Image (cartoon, rainbow, N blue to C red):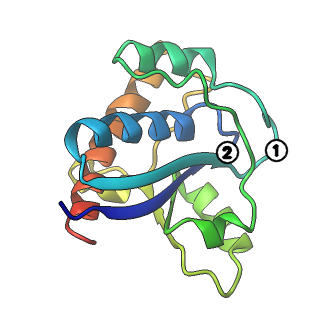
Amino acid sequence: MLKFRYKVLFVCLGNICRSPTAEGVLRHLAAQEAPRLVLEIDSAGTADYHIGAAPDPRSQRAALGRGIDISGLRARQVTKDDFARYDLILAMDRSNLSELEGIKPGNSHAALKLFLDYAPELNLREVPDPYYGDASAFEEVLDLTLAASRGLLSALEEGR
């Protein structure tokens, strides 16, 4: 069976809420729903606030409630090398997309997009930052990342 390889990086501000959730969700769904894809998946933040920290405990609880364990992930900051390593860099919001566009080397072939571009049916462009919200904000992040991850997997399987 032919296998396709893609390298995907999710990016938010601090890499403790949205992007590690997206990383965990995509890993989980890919294993279940797209076994012919060979994916390298990671996450990072545009800021250096939480380097080395585990995902926010509220993100971990919400993900684990859906059978997704993100406790082993650790925050890191985006580097210029990421633009050479990854095929697709997905930002959680316009602010982080703008930051990425500002640091992207001129010779990079990595595609930069908003993650929710893969879930047009949601009529949203940004995954809201749940950091200052309650548990429902973290559940919303999971709902949005599940929808966008399914769209992303479909696009990758179709070679888009």
Q: In the drawing, does residue 149 fall left or right of residue 114?
A: left
Quadrant (top left, top right, bottom left, bottom right) of the N terminus: bottom left
**Mark 1 lies on residue:** 48
Q: Position of residue 40 (x, y in %)?
A: 48, 53
In terms of secondary structure, where does tag 1 sit?
Answer: loop
Residue 148's x, y, as percent? 32, 47
> Which quadrant of the structure image shows residue 75?
top right
Question: Closest to the observer: 40 or 114?
Answer: 40
Amino acid on which the number 1 mark rests in the picture: Asp
Which residue is pictured at 79% across the width and 37% down the height?
A: 51
Q: Is residue 14 left or right of residue 129?
A: right
Dot 1 alpha-carbon crowd within 10 angstroms: few under 14, some 14 to 19, many 20 or more = some
Position above or below: 87 against 120:
below
Seen at 29% across and 62% down, the residue is: 156
Image quadrant assignment for residue 94? bottom right
The residue type indicated by label 2 comes to Leu
- Determine the CA span between mark 2 and mark 1: 8 Å
Instruction: Find residue 67 and report its horizontal and vertical position in percent.
Output: 35, 17
**From what the image shows, is residue 106 above or below residue 11?**
below
Which circle marks residue 13 in the picture?
2
154 lies above or below 54:
below
Q: Which of marks 1 and 2 precedes in the sequence?
A: 2
